[in-house]
Amino acid sequence: MSPARGSRAPRGCPGRRTYAVPVLLASVGTLACAGQLVGQVPRLELDLSATRIEYDTLAPLDAPSVAALAEWQRPSWFGRVTGGLTTFEGGGWSVQGRGNLAWWLAPLGVLSPLRVEAGGSAGGSHHSFGFDSFVARTDFRLHLYGRSAGAWLGASLARARNSFDTASVGSLIPSLGAWAQTGSVRASLAYMRPRVSGSTHPEAHAALTLSQGRLDLTVFGGLRDSPVVGFDERWAGVSGALWLGDHAAIVLAGGKYGADLLQALPGGEFVSIGLRLTPRRSRPIPVSAAAPIVYTTDQTRSGGLGFRVSGAARVEIAGDWNAWIPEPMRRDASGRWLLPAAVGPGVYRFNLRVDGDRWIVPEEVPSVEDGYGGRVGLLIVSEPE
């Protein structure tokens, strides 16, 4: 289980009165891919964890925490909200929160590999001994997407402040990155040159994510070249979730993370164990069928085309053949949700909307990138022989 999302200890705070838990940097791959690692299903998680942290400049501490995450992926936008509460020895505590929002545009049409991303984030923390921090960031990126690889180039503007400093700190962060995926494995690499307080700190991040069976595993690493002699940094770690079913997982994580230059927060080492609870498991890499399934026009007319969606009270379908206007589906006696109308021969993209909220691709059909960072299913219909 990850430590509480969104908090670290302030640099220079005395001894064990440092009331914070580091962000688990297994999300490095997610940042480098600008939303590429999440599927279309809304992601809801509650983490209950115990963490031991040893800061670069402070004594180690043990801290239990509770953290929540809500995440939405739609064809043209992505949103995430996280929050957490951490308690410490001696009755101290901290709360953290963060929000991210991004939009994708296809200026040359959805069939073009070119995408433009605009987004931003804001977050902060409050500690019981009086320390507060806040950071806001805007991002602009140009993406090139392929079937199994992609790259991006962009820049960010960031500003941060904490209660130990009288002035806020700004930064311009040019960056570039690339990702590649094969089967259940995705790799990403990002390079950036943040300029903080007149000094440039080039850094690189890498991540490898595996989603296979009951296991979700992320390995991450990074390095930073500091203009100050002796302050170069290197970090690495791993996070693994072993799913006990669709609603709970045991999560283990550990490693070293780098300092936060904008908020003047120290780096450190951590090890964590916990329990993740969720209404529905969301994989870091979308699962697609190994081979296409070809239906006939007769099957679409006779109710032979249907999909299984566990735990759904209402399901709608939208695709190329109906101008992406959701149509209600009917459930048969076996529990399948049936196509509401006949579909002619062709290859179509589609999604299912469950209970008026989350969009999914049925696991039994193949899926492809939708060009906006999500997935769509493929429906292949032919004339009967």
Image (spheres, grey):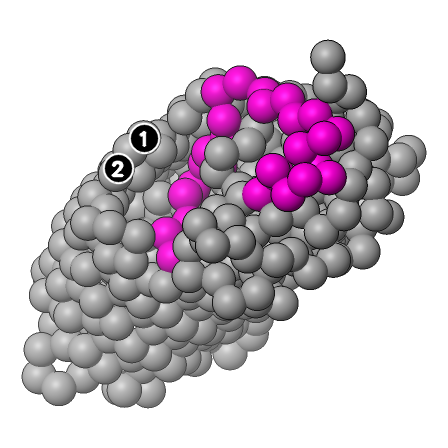
Residue 107 in which image quadrant:
top right
Residue name at image x 40 percent, y 72 percent: 83
Q: Main secondary structure of the magenta part?
A: loop
Residue extending furthest top? 385
Compared across the picture, whether 66 is left or right of 311 comes to left
Residue extending furthest right? 108
> Mark 1 and 2 residues: CB-CB less than 8 Å, in contact?
yes
Towards the viewer: 349 or 17: 349
Quadrant housing the N terminus? bottom left
Compared across the picture, whether 70 is left or right of 367 comes to left
> Which residue corresponds to mark 1?
212
Cα gap from disc 1 to disc 2, whole angstroms = 5 Å
Asked if residue 288 is among those painted magenta in the image, a careful observer would answer yes
Q: How many marks?
A: 2
Residue 328 in which image quadrant:
bottom right
Residue name at image x 83 percent, y 47 percent: 322
Amino acid type at circle 1 is Gln
Residue name at image x 80 percent, y 50 percent: 324
Quadrant housing the C terminus? top right
Asked if residue 294 is among those painted magenta in the image, a careful observer would answer yes
Towards the viewer: 333 or 224: 333
Compared across the picture, whether 25 is left or right of 183 comes to left
Which residues fall within the magenta stretch?
280-306
Q: Is residue 352 above or below residue 122?
A: above
Residue 12: percent from left, percent from top: 27, 67
Residue 227: percent from left, percent from top: 46, 38
Name the element at disc 1: strand
> Which residue corresponds to mark 2?
215
